[in-house]
Amino acid sequence: MLSDGATKIIELRYTCHMGRRFLKFLLIAGLLFWGNPAFARQDDPKLDDLFGQLSETKDIDKAKVIEGSIWKIWLTSGSDTVDFLMLQGISYMSQGQFAKAITLFSTVIKIDPEFSEGWNKRATVLFLIGEYDSSIEDIGRTLELEPRHFGALSGLGQIYDLKKSEEGALSAYEKAVAINPHLPSVKARLDQLIIERDKKRI
């Protein structure tokens, strides 16, 4: 769900509202491109090699480059319309305009429900506004489409952590680190949870 470091929780109520001009664009985009999803993203065959390199490298700087390449592929749908909506949604999310971001990511999902990053980005916004159960649902769909999504797994771990579900958090963090061993904050929290669990067993 979140790339490493993007873990600040923002509790905020929101209302779904958009300007007429942008809504008009969405309607036109939907009519023109609704039935035209692309086949790249999490299906890109280059990802297999990148994940192999990511798990094998011991070089932190190289790992960050590989990570960046993976995120770039994940974020590229192959549809100009979807890519535009994604970028705009990410911009709104970074500005704290969560209602608008959710609207755009929901539109992306409607246009291309097989695009895992659309689900992941909506899960991220839902996480940021404290809608944890809805976020978990979107993370589930993300992982159905891309089981190697270490960002989604990291986010899932954070949610279970906040919900005081030690078992759920441990499982999600362990899976994230197994896929991408170069997530220092996730690994640190995982190690801490393991220590806390072991103390309880003594």
Image (tube, rainbow, N blue to C red):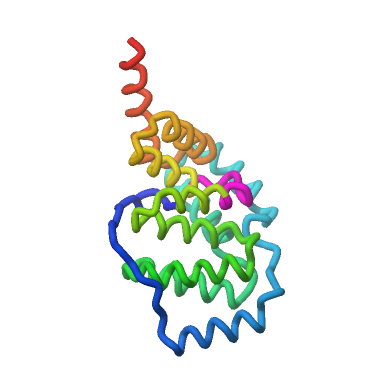
One can see residue 62 in this view:
no
- Residue at 45%, 70% in the rendered image: 89
**Quadrant where the C terminus lies?**
top left
- Residue at 52%, 74% in the rendered image: 85
Q: Residue 61: image x %, image y %?
A: 43, 48
Q: Is residue 123 magenta?
A: no
Q: Nearer the viewer, residue 142 or 55?
A: 142
The quarter of the picture where residue 156 lies is: top left
Q: Residue 96: image x %, image y %?
A: 32, 67
Q: Is residue 145 magenta?
A: yes
What count of labels does the image hold?
Answer: 0
Quick check: 16 above or below 57? below
Q: Nearer the viewer, residue 150 or 22?
A: 22
- Residue at 63%, 73% in the rendered image: 79
- Residue at 58%, 47% in the rendered image: 143
Q: Residue 177: image x %, image y %?
A: 48, 36
Q: Is residue 152 left or right of residue 38?
A: left
Q: Nearer the viewer, residue 16 or 44?
A: 16
Q: Nearer the viewer, residue 159 or 149?
A: 159
Q: Is residue 9 left or right of residue 148?
A: left
Quick check: 183 above or below 94? above
Quick check: 152 above or below 90? above
The quarter of the picture where residue 112 lies is: bottom right
One can see residue 70 in this view:
yes
Residue range of the region highlighted in magenta in the rendering: 141-150
Q: Is residue 129 left or right of residue 63?
A: left
